[in-house]
Amino acid sequence: MPADEHVTAPQTLRQRRRAAATREILDAAEHHIAESGPAALSLRAVARGLGMTVQALYHYFPSREALVTELIAKAYGDLADAVQAAVDTAPDDPDLPRLVIAAEGYRQWAVAHPERFQLLYGTPLRDYAAPVEGPTTQAMRRMSSIFEREMFDGFTVAQLAAAETPALSPELRACLEQLPHYGPGRLPPPATALLLSAWGHLNGLVILEVFGHAAFLGGHQAEIFRIAMRNLLDDVHRQIPAHAGEGVSV
């Protein structure tokens, strides 16, 4: 095999200029969202902020939907980067679970970027539907894989399959079995149910804070969140048996 077989060819000048222009457009769109909220986003407003015509903008994003899709995928990517960075740079503290660290990285990004978080988890934008199996789906899966790894690290598939969840209806079990897997291995339905329930709890607390519904707690919101995440993880792990047959770790 030639040594340079996998070397990426350098971009042409035209490609570099297009990439730079695309980044500038996305930066301008994010700035517009920060000032006016996701619902006010339009190609005309972004073009006006850049001093260019809408027709020129169409060369990079043929529709508002295409721009929104890219913004959502980028927001998910930046959020996942923040969560992974929180885990990677955390001090080695056996008393602070990595799942809690990941959750706090998630919360901190959301609090620091409320409008972009609203783009992900706020009121759905009118007349917008994410493309099926598109970049937004792929970006969300990356996020999910991080939390799946940190929540179930060290457990075998057999243990996760034996998790003591309330009995799953045949219809729900079939639905969970058909869901695409995000991590290195496919989760058994009981573990998927636990992950989805935990995710709803985690994200719900962040939404309450970002949208101002927990302001009565003042500066204690971070502490409350940490307590909640510790309890959440304890509850999840309590439902997974210490031993359940043989199997490999997920």
Image: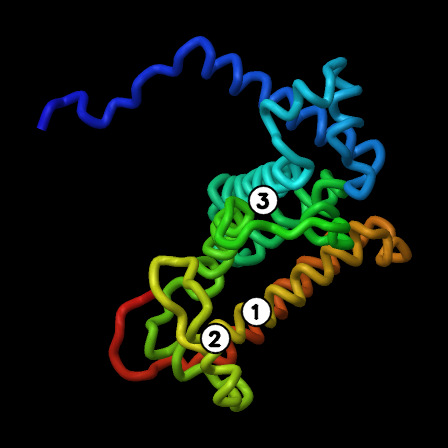
Amino acid type of disc 1? Leu
**Do the residues under discs 1 and 3 have CB atoms within 8 angstroms?**
no
Front residue of 58/175: it is 58
Which residue shows up at 51% across the image and 44% down it?
Answer: 135
Which circle's residue, 2 or 1, is located before the other in the chain?
Answer: 2
Residue 40 location (% of width, % of height): 82, 38
Q: CA distance from mark 3 to mark 2?
A: 23 Å
> Which residue position is annotated with label 1?
196
Front residue of 241/205: it is 205
Residue 205 location (% of width, % of height): 73, 60
Which circle's residue, 3 or 2, is located before the other in the chain?
Answer: 3
Query: How many numbered marks appear?
Result: 3
Horizontal side, residue 75 vs residue 160: left or right: right
Amino acid type of disc 2? Leu
Amino acid type of disc 3? Tyr
SS at circle 2: helix
Name the mark on residue 76: 3
Name the mark on residue 176: 2
Q: CA distance from mark 2 to mark 1?
A: 10 Å
Q: Residue furthest front?
A: 55
**Where, quadrant-wise, is the N terminus in this rendering?**
top left
Residue 98 appears in view: no
Which circle's residue, 1 or 3, is located before the other in the chain?
Answer: 3
Q: Residue furthest right?
A: 216
Q: Residues within 10 Å of mark 1 (few under 14, many from 20)?
A: few
Q: CA distance from mark 1 to mark 3?
A: 18 Å
User: Relative to 85, is 25 above or below?
Assistant: above
Task: Indicate the quadrant where residue 77 lies.
Answer: top right
SS at circle 3: helix
Residue 230 location (% of width, % of height): 61, 65
Which residue shows up at 34% across the image and 15% down it?
Answer: 10
Residue 151 location (% of width, % of height): 48, 63
